[in-house]
Image (cartoon, rainbow, N blue to C red):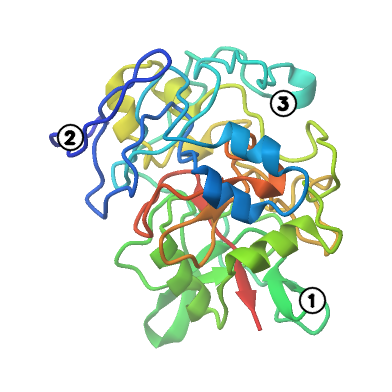
Amino acid sequence: MRRACPPPRLALPLFTLAALVACAAPEGESRTATAASGLASTTTTDASTTAEATTDATTDATTSTSTGASTTTGAATSTSTSTDAATTTDATDTGETGEDATTDATTTGVGDPEDCNTNPIPGCDDEAAPSPNGVPSPPPGVGGCPPGMARVDAFCVDRWEAALVEVLPGDTLGPWSPYLNPAGASVRAVSAPGLVPQGYISQVQASAACVAAGKRLCSDAEWLRACRGAAMRVYPYGDDAEPGACNDARTCHPAIQYFETTDDWIWSELGHPCLNQLPAGLDPAGANPGCESDDGLFDMMGNLHEWTDDPNGTFRGGFYVDTKINGPGCLYVTTAHNTQHWDYSTGFRCCAD
């Protein structure tokens, strides 16, 4: 079902192939007028922001790929029906043809789509939002931390990207769909292996869900320490990239594949519940054992972007289509959105003292 776009509120520049005007989000405006590609939510950061996140020799590589306004992949300005302009990359949306692209099935995961113009789930109902997680019970914490968490230095971090449960009258809990934005609902964060992590969430909503669970969003510094480990590695697993270790290189952009077109209207549909239900897309939490940090945390690189508590809006780590454009691995950082922004690619995990 297509949603009508309101008149654009931002004049966006043109870049590599074409930049298209997309719907602006009713929940808040992007802090940067960005030309964007089909990769959702990976808007480039400026050099100073990236430099703050990089404290070693990898800084040069990070800033060189993530400076300036936006690098487009010749598709469009990306927004969801409830988010702002998002996303950049250096390859085309219809198959990542740039030199950083990973299209070989041996490195992009079993079942990675070959035809980016064919919808593999035509029966997905855009009015329905499945709730596959039920009401889970997280496993015991590690190092004296609350359930589902592990100790990192003096604080605790969710071991897995967070899912949500709904808080019902009488403080009972019910299932919540990981494909549905939680606007207007009372929800609580939960971290456990095998759950479909929550996308479609803003920083404000993620923070409230953490607080409802007796936790909080991680600070930028905490998130980087958790991802990089005590040795301050570039990737959760080490300093050298290991293709296939994390869920970070889906060949086809999900909006192009699901809607079977590159027409501009699809970039106003990045809140569509079916996008994260495509095969070879979003993975269950912990499904990538090679993507584990030294402290036992999973998927801090790839799968979903993860919000931190930056009041200006920052999410980190990349997502299942891209973990390179805004910096490599743990150093990937996006700062071009305010805290009300959300789309299918934005997720989170919590910290605790």
Reading the image, the residue beneath label 1 is 153
As drawn, 44 above or below 174: above
Q: Residue at the location (68% across, 51% down)? A: 54
As drawn, 107 above or below 210: above
Reading the image, the residue beneath label 2 is 8
Of badges 3 and 2, the one in the foreground is 2
Mark 3 or mark 2: whose residue is earlier in sequence: 2
Whether residue 279 is visible to the viewer of this picture, yes or no, is yes
Mark 3, Cα crowd under 10 Å, few <14 / some 14-19 / many 20+, is many
* SS assignment at label 1: loop
Residue 280 relative to residue 88: left or right: right
Image label count = 3
Q: Position of residue 319 (x, y in %)?
A: 59, 41
Reading the image, the residue beneath label 3 is 108
Mark 2, Cα crowd under 10 Å, few <14 / some 14-19 / many 20+, is few
Mark 1 or mark 2: whose residue is earlier in sequence: 2
Q: Residue furthest bottom?
A: 170
Which quadrant of the rendered structure holds the C terminus? bottom right
| Residue 291 or residue 90, whichever sits in front | 90
The three-letter code of the residue at mark 2 reads Pro
Separation of marks 1 and 2 at Cα, in angstroms: 46 Å
Whether residue 122 is visible to the viewer of this picture, yes or no, is no
| Residue 120 or residue 211, whichever sits in front | 211
Answer whether labels 1 and 3 touch (C-beta < 8 Å): no
Mark 1 or mark 3: whose residue is earlier in sequence: 3
| Residue 275 or residue 242, whichever sits in front | 242
